[in-house]
Image (cartoon, helix red, strand yellow):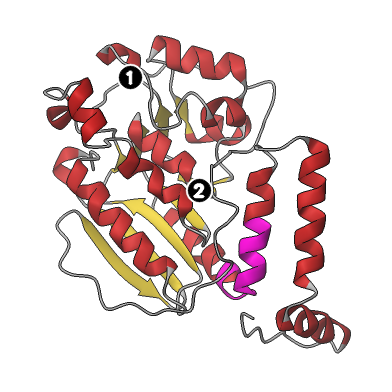
Amino acid sequence: MFAALRQPLARAAVARPLARSFSVARPAYNAVSPAKPAQLEYLLTETRGRVALVTLNRPKALNALCNGLFVELNKVLEEFDNNSDIGAIVITGSERAFAAGADIKEMKDSNFIDNYKNNFLGHWTKITTIRKPIIAAVNGFALGGGCELAMMCDIIYAGDKAVFGQPEIKLGTIPGAGGTQRLVKAVGKSKAMEMCLTGSWNLNADEAERGGLVSKVFPADQVVDEAVKTAEKIASLSQPVVQMCKDAINQSFELSLSAGLTFERRLFHATFATNDQKEGMSAFAEKRKATFTHN
C-alpha cells in the first residue's frame, strides 16, 4: 500500500489534458450483448440506464490493485464495452479510497522474471483499449497505481477530499503504468518531476483541478452521481461518433499537429456517412431532440 506525505503545492504553470494510448484499428462499434458476468470478488458493478458503474471493492486494503482485481476489471470492462445497451462507464472506489496503489504485499516477492513472464503491467494497460468513454470518480486516495488508473480514464472527476500522488520512488522503484508519461502531459514537466522524484508531493483535489489533472471537483458524496450524470449525457449521443471523437482527441498526443489535423478531418468526413449525423442535423434544424440509432 502506498502512503505519502502531503506538502503545499504551487499552482502548475501549464495545464494540459491527459493522454491515453489506443489502437486506431479498433472497430468503431460492437453491438454484441454478452452474458451476465460471473460472481466478482474484488468489484461491484451496476447499471444506471445506459451507464455502467464499476466500484473497486477492497476497502480494508484501500482498494489496493492486486492481480485478481485487474483480471476482474479487464473482464468486466470488456463485457461492458461489447454491450450495446451501455454507452459509457464510470469507475470509482469503495469507502474512502479510489485506489491507494498496487498491492505491495503481492509485489514485494516478485522479481524481473516473474513480472516479465506474467505480463504484470499488461493487465493494467488493457483499460486503454476500451472504446467507450470512461470517467474516473476519484473519491479519496489515488496514489501510485491508483493515480495511474485514474489517468488511464478519459475524464477525471474528484471529490473534494481526493488526493493524487506518485510515491513509488520511496519503495525503490518508479511509476510503471504511465505515471511518468501521462502525468507530465497533465501538469507539466516541473510538477511531474517534483511529484515523482520526491514521492511525497501530492495534489489535493483543488490543486489537481488547477493543474489540469482533474476536470471538475465536487463534494465527496456527490462525485459518483455527477460522474454518472456526465456519462448519461455521453451515452445519449451517437456511439460511433462518440468513439470517433475520443480517438481523435487521443491521437493529438500521438501525432504531429499536421498529421493530427488530417486524422481529425478524416473522421469528420466519416461522420457524414452515418445515419446519426443526418438525424442530429435534421433534429437541430427542426428544433427537436435527436433520436440516435448508433449507426
Q: Residue at x 73, y 84 (%)?
A: 275
Residue in the foreground of this view, choosing between 289 and 68: 68
Numbered circle sitting on residue 260: none
Q: Classify mark 2: helix, strand or loop.
A: strand
Instruction: Tell me: residue 152, above or below residue 271.
Output: above
Whether residues under marks 1 and 2 lie with C-beta atoms below 8 angstroms apart, the answer is: no
- Residue type of the residue flagged with mark 1: Glu
Residue 9 visible in rendering:
no
Side of 193 relative to 119 (left or right): right
Q: Which residues are magenta?
A: 234-246
Task: Tell which of 142 and 123 is nearer to you.
Answer: 123
Left or right: 27 in relation to 241: left
Q: Where is residue 55? Give x, y as percent.
A: 30, 56
Residue 241 x %, y % = 67, 68
Q: Quadrant of the C terminus?
A: bottom right
Q: For this view, does 199 lie left or right of residue 266?
A: left
In the rendered image, residue 207 lying in the magenta stretch gets the answer no
Amino acid type of disc 2? Tyr
Quarter assignment of residue 224? bottom left
Q: Write down the residue under mark 1.
A: 168
Residue 135 visible somewhere in the drawing: yes
**Residue picked out by circle 2:** 157
The mark lying in front, picked from 1 and 2, is 1
Q: Secondary structure at mark 1?
A: helix
Q: How far apart in space, not on screen, are marks 1 and 2 (Cα)?
A: 23 Å
